Structures are given as structure tokens and as C-alpha cells.
Amino acid sequence: MNASSDQQLIRQSLDGDDSAFDELVTRYQDRLVHSLEFALGSRDDALEAAQQAFISAWRRLATFRHEAEFYSWLYRIAMNAAISRRRKQRIETTSLESLEEASGASPADPNPAADPAHPMSSEERVRIVRQALQEVAEEFRQPLIMKEMDGFSYEQIASILEIPLGTVRSRIFRARQELTERLKRVLGDDR
């Protein structure tokens, strides 16, 4: 699955061979959905964003610059779709705090883990880490996910996000700091 075979599939797609683009989708969909799931925090949202990214990539395939890797180009389209989706969700969502302020009532948490005496399972820790990651500012979270979850090099991240290499390093450092602070607040010093 090297870049030359990607290039060949792209050329075949541009020549009208729909099965060639289907092969690109099959090749990259699982990896892309997995990455988007971390970025969006939801498998359903990740699947929807990936689908939108593949549609957009297919429509813009003629604009693909062949010196780049196809997956890097696709990933950038997908992350832009994910960011747009997150912005739209923020606009449509009313915060729990504002509902509490308006009603004067605070809903009871039926989750047994809400009880401070309840021991935390590893599954709960994963959920907490994912939630804390979602709260890290987008500009810092995105490069961190690309580095730690997707395995991109600093150089690849800089190319995909079109930012200087030093900015990538700085944002990943800040993301790690912010994530650590959030986890300390939630988990305490026992993590």
C-alpha cells in the first residue's frame, strides 16, 4: 500500500474508474474513522465526518497535488470536516449549567461512579481521559491526536496543518500540559 499505488488508484479514478476510488476508501476508512473518533469523541460523529471527507475528496480529486501523500490530504479534509462539525454542535448545544441556572435544579447523577467512594475502573479512566482530551483547545488537541493516536511525525503534522514545525512542537507541548492539568483536577494526584 505504498504511495505509488495510491497515485495509480487516483489516476484510475480520475479516468472514470469508480472501483479505484472504492479501493482508496477501503484502504483508509478504518484508520480515518479511528482518528476522527478521538477528535470528535463519538463513533457516530466520526463515521459521519469520514463519509463527508470521502465525498469531498472524491469531488476534489482533480485538485490533489501528487507530491503529497493521499492519506495526508484526506486526513486534512476530514479534520476540517470534524472541526466544522464540532463548531456546529457547539452552536446547537445548550449547556447543562445554563439549564441548571434557568431551572434552579441540578439533576442527580445516576452513574454509580459519581459516588466518591466508588472505585474507578480502567474503562472509566479511559472515558475520563477522552473527556479531558475533548476539553483541550482544538488548536492544541488536533496536533496531539495526530502525533499520539495517528502516529504522524512532527514534519507530517506541519505539512497537513500548514503550520511551522516549531508551532507543531509548541502546540503538542501545550496540549500535553493542558491534558495533564485537567486529569489532575479530575483524578487527583493518584493517577
Image (cartoon, rainbow, N blue to C red):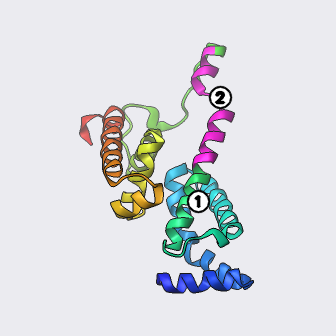
Q: Can the viewer see residue 31 in this picture?
A: yes
- Mark 1 nearby-residue class (10 Å; few <14, some 14–19, many ≥20): some
Front one among 185 and 48: 48
Image point 30% across, 46% down: which residue?
A: 173
The residue where tag 1 is placed is 77
The relative height of residue 100 versus residue 164 in the rendered view (above or below) is above
Quote the CA–CA distance across marks 1 and 2. 28 Å
Residue 137 location in percent, x, y?
45, 39
The picture places residue 18, in percent across and down from the top left corner, at: 73, 82
Q: Earlier in the sequence, mark 1 or mark 2?
A: 1
Residue that appears at 59% across and 59% down? 77
Instruction: Please name whichever residue, 79 or 73, is drawn nearer the observer in this view of the structure.
Output: 73
Whole-percent x, y for residue 20 in the image: 66, 84
Secondary structure mainly formed by the magenta segment = helix
Task: Please tell me how crowded label 2 is: few (under 14), some (14-19), or many (20+) other residues with Cα within 10 Å.
Answer: few
Coordinates of residue 69 in the picture (x, y in percent): 49, 73
SS label for mark 1: helix
Q: Amino acid at mark 1?
A: Ile
> Which quadrant of the view contains residue 56?
bottom right
Left or right: 63 as drawn, with respect to 185: right
Report the quarter where the C terminus lies: top left
Mark 2 lies on a secondary structure that is: loop
Residue 155 versus residue 127: which sits nearer the camera? 155
Mark yes or no: residue 128 visible.
no
Q: Which mark is residue 52?
A: none
Looking at numbered disc 2 in the image, what kind of residue is underneath it? Thr
Q: Are marks 1 and 2 in contact (CB under 8 Å)?
A: no
Residue holding disc 2:
94
The residue lying at 57 percent from left, 47 percent from top is 83
Q: Is residue 2 magenta?
A: no
Which contiguous range is marked in magenta? 83-101
